Image (tube, rainbow, N blue to C red):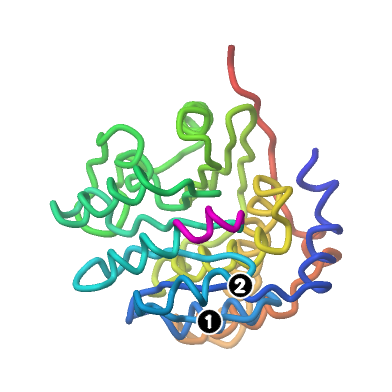
Amino acid sequence: MKAMELSKEIFDNIKKCAPVVHNISNYITATDCANMTLACGGSPTMADDPEEVEDIASACAGSVINMGNTGGYFTESMLRTGLINNKVHHPVVLDPVGAGAAKHRNEVLEKLIEKIHFSIIRGNVSEIKFVGDKSSSANGVDAAEADLATEDTVYDIAQYAMRLSKAMDTVIAISGPIDIVANGERAYLIRNGHPQMSRVTGTGCMLSSAIGVFISANPEHILEAATVCISAYGYAGELAQKKVESEHAGTGSLRMYLMDYMSNMDQETFAKGAKIEEVLLAE
């Protein structure tokens, strides 16, 4: 399996270059996203002023565009960030927070997708379905229960992700009970993580920032780097929840331990806990 075979190189590349990653985040999760970037071995810059994002982004190794904020100048900042990354050939992540939830947000999303080539689009299944064909039944920023991947539906969703990736020429990452990362030919199913992670605000935003670190250090292996990142992040969540349970603690501690375990994650630890399955596109 290529993702596992490349995992040592992926972790080594992060250590070698310690990529500076530009994030346009939202005010709820900006600090956590910055700290998760550091925990993964990168260095964050959180600039969002449209007058400086081009200079900042072009000097970084990659960018993460989080659609948590779409009002005011944020749309222009996101557009300028994406376009400059395309111009200088740096990876750029899109997190389509709340896709399908509101008319203005949907218009911003369509504009971004029309004008920017994203290296990877990561969201929950409802957000990704809206990106793909406007079929999401979500209400707000959380995935609809009916959309979530189960053992009965995950292979069909993986095929959908592969077809969407091929159509959009971008890696598609779907977060949920079973995570899916796909390009136009293959998908990786990831069975790491813990349900309690969904009880902490910003775990999805932090994951997108983590992906930004992994792919910025490994721009030639976007699919595999994102897969290793998502699996490592989920495994860190598993370890964090075990620690929480042993201390009879709660979600505040889970947030802290998630960051702790990611900051100590290496290839050796990752290899012990990774649960990854490869699926190919059906003809």
* Quarter the N terminus occupies: top right
Can the viewer see residue 221?
A: yes
Q: Is residue 89 left or right of residue 49?
A: right
The magenta segment? 83-89
Q: Name the residue located 81 percent from the left edge and 65 percent from the top edge.
A: 13
Kind of residue indicated by mark 2: Cys
For label 2, the residue is 60
| Quadrant of the rendering where the C terminus is positioned | top right
Which structural element holds mark 2?
loop
Determine if the magenta segment contains residue 86. Answer: yes
Position of residue 18 in the picture relative to residue 186 (left or right): right
Q: Residue at x 41, y 74 (%)?
A: 200
Residues at marks 2 and 1 touching, judged by CB atoms closer than 8 Å: yes
**Residue furthest top in the image:** 283
Distance in Å between CA atoms under marks 2 and 1: 9 Å
Q: Nearer the viewer, mark 2 or mark 1?
A: 2
Q: Secondary structure at mark 1?
A: strand
Q: Position of residue 238 (x, y in %)?
A: 62, 67
Magenta stretch secondary structure, dominant: helix
Question: Mark 1 sits on what residue?
Answer: 45
At x 60%, y 74%, the residue is 59
* Rendered view: 64 above or below 101: below
Residue 197 x, y percent position in the rendering:
47, 68
Asked if 195 appears above or below 118 in the picture, the reply is below
